[in-house]
Structure formats: C-alpha cells, structure tokens
Amino acid sequence: MNDLIAALGAELAELQALGRLRTRPVIDGPDDRVIALRGPGGRKVLINWASNDYLGLSQELTVINGARKALRGCGAGAGAARLLGGGLALHRRLEEGVARFFGTEDCLLTTTGFQANQAALVSLASDPEDVLIIDRLCHASTYDGARLAAGTLLRFRHNDIEDLERHLERTVGNRRRIVCVESIYSMDGDEAPLAAIAAACTRQGAILVVDEAHALGVVGPGGRGLCADLGVVPDVLVATCSKSLGSQGGLIAGAQPIVDICVNRGRSFLFSTAPVPAAVGAAEAALRRLRERPEMPEHLRIAAAGLRAALRAQGWQVPEGRSPIIPVIVGDEQRTLELAARLRELGHFAPPIRPPTVPEGSCRLRLTVTLAHRPKDLRQLAAAMAKLRPVT
Ligand SMILES: Cc1ncc(COP(=O)(O)O)c(C=O)c1O
C-alpha cells in the first residue's frame, strides 16, 4: 500500500477511535415497515423507524405498477442526459404534473433531490456578486450547491428571522441575494417561520428558495407542502420524489425563467443521465395516488401525534411538532448509541444520529412514522422506549 492510501487508513482509524466510523449496513426487504438487518449475529427482522417513505407509497401496488409500465415502455435506463437524447415524454409529463400540483408555471426534474438543490443554487448564484443566505440547519445538498455556486455563502441562525434580516441588510448592494430554507427540517422535524421569512425576502428584494423535501405529502392541502399550507409563494420550490412519493428524482418548481435558467446553468442537471423511467413512472403514480387520497397526510399526522405524546409522557425530550419526524434528543453520543443498540434488541430499527449530521451535543434517535406502520407497531415502540427509561 502506498503512503497516500495508508494515510486514508489512519484517517479512518481516527474516526473509529471516536466511535464515528460509518459502515454500510445491509438490509433486506420485505417491505418498508419491517427490515431485515444482516450482521455478525445473523439476520434480524426489525420494525423500521428510519424510512422517509412517509406515505408508504413505495410499496403500493399502483406505484409499483407505474414503475413496471414505464420500464416495459421505455427500458431500464434513459441512456443519456436530458438535453442529449435522454429526454422522454414521461419526464416531461411528470414535470407538468408536478407544476400543476404546486400551481407553478413549470418544474424541472433532476435525477435526485441532492442534484435539484445543486442545480438551483449554481444557476441562481452565478456571479461572484451574488450572495446565498442559508439557514444553518439546511441539508448538505443546499450547502454543497452553495459551495459550487459562484456567489458567497452566508449562514443565519436556525429559524432566527432577526439574524436573517441582519444578513439581508448587510448585503443590500449585492447583485442577487438568495435565501435558502427548508420548510420542515430533516433532523428536527420543526417548521420554518415561512410567512416571516417570505415577508423579509419581499421587503428586501431577495429570492426565496424553499426545500419542501420533508413537507411534500406531509402537510398542506392534499400534501402540497408547508408553503401551500401557509399561503406562501416561494420563488423556487425544491422537492424530491424520494420521500413521500416513494421513488427517486429531484424537483425544482417555479416561474418559467427560474426553471429555464436551471435548464441552462444547472450543471448537475445538464451533465447527469436523465432519471430512469421506472423511477419516473413510480413518482407519477404516487402523485396520482396523493391526488386521489388527499386525506393521507392527516392520517399520518394523527399517527405521529400519538407516538410523540406517548414519548413525551414517558419523560423523553421530544420537541412539539406536527411532522412525522420525531427526534428524541439524548445529547450524549455514547448514550445515543446504547439506546439504538437496545432498541435493536427489542425489535426496532432507529439509527443514532450524531455529528457531523447534527451539531455536537445534540445526538438523538430520529424516529419517523409512516403510513406503513400499524397501530401495534406504534404501541410496541412506545413500550420499548418505556423500558429504556422508566416513566418519570
Ligand atoms: C432537506 C433535503 N433536501 C434534499 C435531499 C436530497 O434528496 P434525495 O435523497 O432525493 O437526493 C434530502 C434527502 O436526504 C433532504 O433531506
């Protein structure tokens, strides 16, 4: 092994010593509700509390059939990037369907949600005089998009409107100011004060980008997200097909010039093969399902509220909220790892969330409720959590 490779080994050993070495757990189906984890002790079937497939649609027959139909009709792969011969009618159809769903002029489909954020931010902040003002807790894809963009990256304190206003005031002379937030944050499940943020952007003439990855299908009328729920119209709405739509693919929705600039400047869109037809067919079927069953988000909210209340009653530190993301804040890393291991012994898969995913000292179990869970799963998880900490 040469010295450069050996140095990587030393870096990995350091992570291991810190208890932060990530490996790739192997899980098998049979579905989203339960997973089979293969490990040194053999195969163990666990209730899955780590899925973002909030509505359980990835396992619905109509969605699977949507994928099958697209696969049979168009083949396994798109074969090329969208502008170089990989653009199929079904890509365009999904874009038009999503634009109608959100009520925007157009939508651009990218291969993943990660690429959607990159394409949007690189396209909008294309000049060194541009500034990206990002909530501290935004997803890695927003930060990576901002780092790849020509503009300057500034962060504001999480959900702190005064801090945001300060940044906007200090950057008045810049060419373009782009404010990036999530509507529901992925690790805390808390909501952004979108009405106040949108008002600040309007006052200051800044562009507002809202990532609705964890809100699509979860809140708002018919699952249209938090912006729709609050009557906020962002300049750019980013979402993903990989969570509530149970498939894969990124979405950038907005006015025509927004979408067109991303088509022209979004490198992660331009230079990546178009989404595979099966994923697009599945996403289209999932969107149809959401339109047919607009009550699904409310059912999800009720199930999550029950678990949240049960855990709070047991004395766990669980913030209030209405999202299916339920963080159980533990703080200490070792204790979080122990709790996750104990839960596995009791039949539940809830991975520990630690730095760098969350800030130091805020380690947690992140439990996500989905419509695939049965009432007895929720009861069993609450009982297991009660065993790990006596009722206070
Ligand atoms: C807030 C947020 N944005 C974007 C993404 C990226 O989406 P995808 O998994 O489709 O790449 C994620 C997913 O992890 C996310 O949590």
Image (spheres, rainbow, N blue to C red):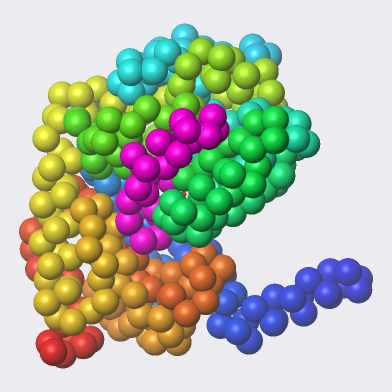
Q: Residue at x 20, y 24 (%)?
A: 291
Which of 33 and 37 lies nearest the eye of the viewer? 33
On the rendered structure, is 123 left or right of 66?
Answer: right
In the picture shown, does residue 194 fall above or below 99? below
For the image shown, how many numbered marks are present on the structure?
Answer: 0
Residue 199 shown in magenta:
yes
In the picture shown, does residue 3 fall above or below 127? below
In the picture shown, does residue 47 fall above or below 147? below
Could you say where residue 140 lies in the image, as x and y percent from the top left? Answer: 56, 52
Residue 389 shown in magenta:
no
Q: Residue at x 70, y 35 (%)?
A: 174
Does the rendering let one see residue 318?
yes
Does the rendering let one see residue 42?
no
Could you say where residue 227 lies in the image, as x and y percent from the top left? Answer: 32, 34
Could you say where residue 334 lies in the image, as x and y percent from the top left? Answer: 45, 87
Which of 17 and 279 lies nearest the eye of the viewer? 17
Q: Residue at x 55, y 51 (%)?
A: 166
User: Magenta residues?
Assistant: 182-211
The image quadrant that residue 248 belongs to is top left
In the picture shown, does residue 204 fall above or below 322? above
* Quadrant of the drawing holding the C terminus: bottom left
* Quadrant of the drawing holding the N terminus: bottom right
Q: Residue at x 55, y 20 (%)?
A: 258
